[in-house]
Each structure stands twice: as structure tokens, then as C-alpha cells.
Image (cartoon, rainbow, N blue to C red):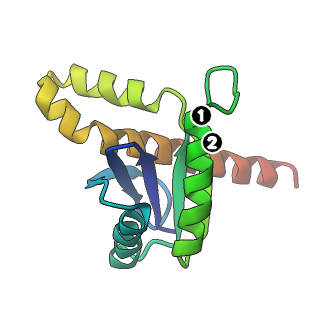
Amino acid sequence: MRCLGLDLGSKRIGVALCDPDERVATPLTVVQRGKSRNDDHAKIASLVTEYEAQAVVVGLPLNMSSKVTAAAQAAIEETEQLQRALSVPVHLHDERLTTVAANRSLLEMEMKADARRRVVDKVAAAVMLQSFLDHRRNQRDSAGDAR
């Protein structure tokens, strides 16, 4: 199943895409926030159609003790709105430390600060989506072992 991963930000939305076999998530694009969430969700709906995504995964920014922060509550509310705007299922997935991991990876590539700012959101979306895919694969493997 092909999935889009979203890293919701106040100014930008990082977007990642996985292959149909759900093995690898890759950074896709960054959507600049528009005048309204409806505009943003229309852009995401267009990407869902263009890439034939069968699900969308939205990063949930919990704090380190798994508590729902204001940012997490905002992501939950936007995810509910997004679900109404899309014809595919929308899932939430823990995104703790994805931006940190994305920044670290880009720093290791010796990317300059201005270049990092342009891509960090889509890289963070890919890190989060890969975590979602790995989690699903581990659940399937565990279910198979229990038989």
C-alpha cells in the first residue's frame, strides 16, 4: 500500500511517500501553508491522487513522556479535518525526535543551514513514515509468529 507521510508545521507541511510494498519512505516535497487549512488539505488531496496513495500518516508530536501537548492536540484536530477532506484513511503516528533525526542526518551530510531549512520538513516526514512502516511490519511479523 502506498502511503503519504505528513509532518505538520505552522508554516510548512513536510511530505514523504513510501513504495507500494511499504519498505522504504522517501522525502517527497514541502507544501507551504496557504491561506486556510482547506487550501492546505486540497493540496494534500491532490498529492494523494497524483501518487495514488491509499493512506495518509500524520506525525503526532507527543512529548517525551507521551503526553498530549498543545501541538499534539492541534495535530489531532487537523487530522480529523483532513480525514473529512480525503477519500483515504488517515492515521496518526508518534513523531517524537523525527525532526532531530532529520537535522542530524542533514548535518552529517554537511548541508548548509539554509539548505537544511528547505528540506528538513520532508526528511522528518520520511523518518516518521519509515517508523510507521517498520511498526506495521513488526506487528505483522509478530502476528505471524503467534500462529
Residue 31 lies left or right of residue 65; in this view the side is: left
- Depicted 114 relative to depicted 39: above or below: above
Q: Which mark is residue 9?
A: none
Residue located beneath label 1 in the image: 70
Q: Residue at x 72, y 49 (%)?
A: 139
User: Do the numbered discs 1 and 2 sit on residues whose CB atoms are within 8 Å?
Assistant: yes
Residue 147: image location, x then y, percent: 88, 55
SS category of the residue bearing label 2: helix
Crowd band around label 2 with a 10 angstrom C-alpha radius: few (<14), some (14–19), many (20+) = some
Residue 67 lies left or right of residue 16; in this view the side is: right
Q: Residue at x 48, y 48 (%)?
A: 129
Q: Which mark is residue 73?
A: 2
Residue at the right extreme of this rendering: 147
Residue 115 lies left or right of residue 77; in this view the side is: left
Residue 134: image location, x then y, percent: 57, 45
Whether residue 121 is visible: yes
At label 2, the amino acid type is Gln
- Depicted 140 relative to depicted 138: above or below: below
Q: Residue at x 39, y 79 (%)?
A: 49
Mark 1–mark 2 Cα distance, whole angstroms, equals: 5 Å
Residue 11: image location, x then y, percent: 32, 44
- Depicted 133 relative to depicted 89: above or below: above
Crowd band around label 1 with a 10 angstrom C-alpha radius: few (<14), some (14–19), many (20+) = few
At label 1, the amino acid type is Ala
Residue 2: image location, x then y, percent: 47, 67
Residue 130 lies left or right of residue 102; in this view the side is: right
Q: Nearer the viewer, residue 12 or 54?
A: 12
SS category of the residue bearing label 1: helix
Residue at the front extreme of this rendering: 35
